[in-house]
Amino acid sequence: MHNALRPLLRRTVVWYTLVALVATPVRADPGLQAAQAAHAEGLAAGRAVQPTVRNSLEAPSAQNVVPGYTATPPERSHYGKSSLFGASDARLSACALTPADPVCQALLGARASAHAPREGVSPYHPAVMDARRIAGNPASKLEDIASFYSGCQVDAVSTPSTEPRVCRQYSGATAQSCARTLAVDVARSSSCSPGAWFAQTSLGGLSLAVQCRPDQPASRQRMRLTDRGTPLAFFDADVGTAASFPESVHSLADGRQVWLANNRCDGNDCQLTAYVAAPLRQVCTSEGDGPTVCQDEPPFLPRYAACPAGALSGDQILQFPVDQLPTTATLDPSRCFTPSAQANDAAGYDPTGAIRSHFWRQHSLRQITGYQLNPRHGPVPHMALRFERPHTTVTEADRWDDQCPATFGDRCFVAAAARCVEGPATRDIEGFPVTRACWRYATALSCQFGQPSDECAPLAAAGCTPGASVCRETDAATGHCTHMERTYDCPVAPITAARARNCPADVFCVAGSCFNTARTADTDFARAMSFLEAAREAGVYLDTDLLQVFKGEPNRCRDRLLKNCCTSDNAGRGMSNQSVFGVGSRLVFDALMNAGNREFLYHGMRALLLNGGFNGTFTSYGVTVAVNGTALPAGSSVLYAGESMVVAFDPWSLVIAIVIYVVMSAMACDEEEGKLAMKEGAGLCHAVGTYCSSCIRVLGRCVSCITHTTNKCCFNSALARIIQQQGRLQFGKGWGSARAPDCSGFTVAQLQQLDFGRMDLSEFYASIVPTLPNLGTIQSGNANRAADCYYGEGRCP
């Protein structure tokens, strides 16, 4: 009875509590209302003045800001010129007449500054030498170090009587070069007016003309046929390929065709003959009262080459009479025949009797060598045309750009004859190939731009002994050394220098008083870090049954014949709480642990998404949701920003989060082995042992192991692993066996009994020491950022 009433009573209490919460009036906070009203008033004022401010903003132009600004300064003409001696001398000469001009003042001031004598300071100037001696032996100017610092053994060392000195000799000559560059100007001219019809020939009312199309190939010459000015046909004629027989090139509307023959070109001199005739014409004849005989006659008859010896052409062989009636019919005139004894060959005879035979076999076809008009066809209009093929004449004009003036103000002389550096070559100039033996000549010069300088003369005058000498720079044009480096041994006054040795490592002494600088190992830091992590674990996923902290997880990986899944993946170093959850320490790796340990992450997500009391961030696959002002991870790009929530995207975390699926699928290892590899990469695991989990058995006996399984204990931080490894040694606690690893944690009492002074935490210290910034990278980044700010008109990245 009581068990049945208990759920009913529980529901009643819950509903009563909910009704009481809903019915209770919510009193507004006056301070909060005032803050919200001020915020709304500020937004309204800003939105009201926004159009006025926007209209008053104008992007200033350089012409309004920079005095004397112009987009086309006269100095643009100097761009690209390698030798400007003449232009600079002319400009300076002109400035002598206008010294008050601002540009001339700048030029004259620069020249005066360049020519102003300056006292040279060599490395062996007395002031420089004194500074070097003091740096090498401070005791020479200061008091003896032994009177202040008594912790080291100080020895007096005599310096050598000479010291090496290096000097340089400059000839002042500099290797230069100048060039003569060829530019070819191309001028085009056409042999006729493009598009015009020229070279016309006529016969009666028919006219044939050629259109001017320069540089068209001979096979595509445009023709026009007219009848009393009316165009009949437009067609392309091939005048480059000679035809031995007229070819039809166009059909007219009345059935006639245009035929071309005798076409050929000798260079640009071309000719052809055009015929206008029907392809066949029916001709009918009758003899006496006999029947009318009609036959189609072509306009042209071919001319054939002679048949070889022993053969007759078909028109030389008559057919035998039929019904005793004489006939003039012959065999095929386009073929050659030889005598045959076969009755199924063509029948006929040679009327001349030169070859006696009644049957003839075809031997070969006769080659057409020409043509003639067929008189039976009737008259055929023809027009002979000779013309100059339209073409373009290119005229080349060489123009040399000589950058080698006759004199360089007596500062340079020619060291070697000019040599060709570009050519021979063919270049395309305005679509026309131009070939020259040389396009550019270079001349080697030796120029005396500076005064000779000799740093060695003072050393020789001071009695120094010369030693080795090395030429550091040679004038390639003359082969002379322009920069000589020499070594001298110079006498110096002997002095005594103090050298300290055998200085103690843990003792510091001043004026006879010594202090012990040795230090003992600091156990407070390790103890504090351990108890902080233990407290965090106790609040997140403490084992309530055993009340243990720093508890590990058993993980296994397999080493098979073709694939070893017991590897280490450095990508696990990026799976810390800082990158996965958005907050917390980068020293713990809750995301790499099993589903039970990830409850902390799930509770955080539920608090964020279900309006719970939670301040923080939640990150999944690189997408971070930050609530109530929590800072976003570094490198995140904001996708959405509201009043109390910000959604951001971190590409690097996305890459780390999906590496399990991409890499593990390519490795053919299961997901748990992939996670174990990432834990190994983060330094979270301790290997317990390896055993044979699969083998080939013969008669019940294992003869060959095909799979080795390794069991490991993995922890959520490197600190937990180190404490486990070294703490178990203090308690004499083992790790279990390879098949059954013991990954249990420490009780709170055991944690308090650990002697952290005996633990080596150097690995943990190294993981938290920050990396020093790279000075070169910072300087390069600042330089690039400054350039972006300048050229970006103030929009800095």
Image (spheres, rainbow, N blue to C red):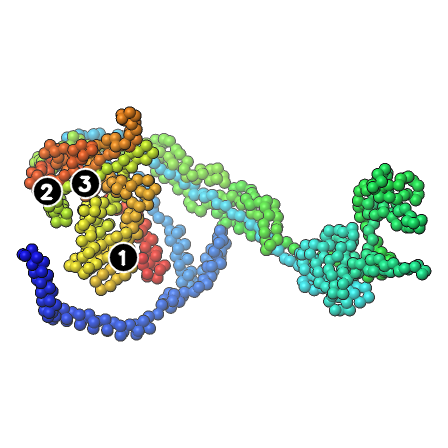
Q: Position of residue 587 (x, y in %)?
A: 19, 45
- Give the answer, above or below, for where 406 lies relative to 34: above
Q: Quadrant of the N terminus?
A: bottom left
**Circle 2: is it few (<14), some (14-19), or many (20+) Cα within 10 Å?**
few
**In front here: 191 or 154?**
191
Q: Position of residue 407 (x, y in %)?
A: 52, 49
Q: Is residue 35 left or right of residue 327?
A: left
Q: Quadrant of the C terminus?
A: bottom left
Which is more N-terminal, label 1 or label 2?
2
Residue kind at label 3, given as amino acid type: Glu
Residue kind at label 2, given as amino acid type: Leu
Residue at point 27% right, 38% down? 568
Residue at point 9% right, 67% down? 20
- State how far apart marks 3 and 2 are (Cα): 15 Å
Q: Position of residue 226 (x, y in %)?
A: 75, 66
Residue at point 72% right, 52% down? 240
Q: Position of residue 89 (x, y in %)?
A: 48, 55
Q: Is residue 86 visible?
A: yes
Q: Are marks 3 and 1 in contact (CB under 8 Å)?
A: no
Q: Nearer the viewer, mark 3 or mark 1?
A: 3
> Which residue of the protein is positioned furthest toward the left in this rendering?
2
Mark on residue 553? Answer: 3
**Circle 3: is it few (<14), some (14-19), or many (20+) Cα within 10 Å?**
some
Mark 1, residue position = 648
Which is more N-terminal, label 1 or label 3?
3
Mark 2, residue position = 546
Q: Is residue 286 left or right of residue 702?
A: right
Of helix, strand and loop, which one carries label 3? strand
**Circle 1: is it few (<14), some (14-19), or many (20+) Cα within 10 Å?**
many
Quadrant of the image occupied by residue 625? bottom left
